[in-house]
Amino acid sequence: MELLEDPTLTELLPGEVEVLKRSFANRLEAGKFFNELLDTAAVHLTERDKGLWTWLTLFYFDEVCPADGHGRRNPEDEAYTDRTEFARISGDHQGSDDSGGRL
């Protein structure tokens, strides 16, 4: 996806960590996976890194915001996205910030 690789929107982390598409049986499995991934990448203090979590959410969007039986999604559901980041990406700049995504 172009947004994920655009150098004006994405800041690469040091080192070589490959993020692969996959699915998760539940939140616990996803949490363990992301914990191992971020440990491997030597990324610390991730809980406040909106760019990192925005990038991962977009990369795993099909998992985070699955389509319903009619192919529709509800990405505005706050359980899935940070409203300021969603507004920035979608072009609705009310209350958005200018931070870019990170990998």
Image: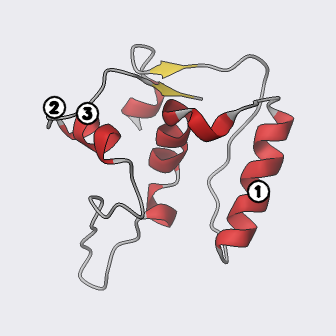
Residue 86 rendering spot, x and y as whole percentages: 29, 44
Answer whether labels 2 and 3 touch (C-beta < 8 Å).
yes
Identify residue type, mark 1.
Phe
Based on the displayed image, in which of its 4 quarters is residue 49 positioned?
A: top right
Residue bearing mark 3:
88
Secondary element at image label 2 = loop
User: Considering the image in quadrants, where does the C terminus appear?
Assistant: top right
Residue at x 41%, y 23% (from the top left corner): 100
CA gap, disc 3 and disc 1: 27 Å
Secondary structure beneath dot 1 equals helix
N-terminal of the pair, mark 3 or mark 1, is 1
Circle 2 residue:
93
Screen quadrant of the N terminus: top left
Residue 75 image label: none
Which residue type does callout 3 highlight? Arg
Circle 3 packing at 10 Å, graded few (<14), some (14-19), many (20+), is some
Callout 2 amino acid: His
Give left or right: position of 50 versus 77.
right
User: Which quadrant of the figure has residue 29?
Assistant: bottom right
Residue drawn at the location 45% of the way across and 56% of the way down: 61
Q: Where does label 1 land, which residue? A: 33
Q: Nearer the viewer, mark 3 or mark 1?
A: 3
- Does residue 52 lie above or below 68 as drawn? above
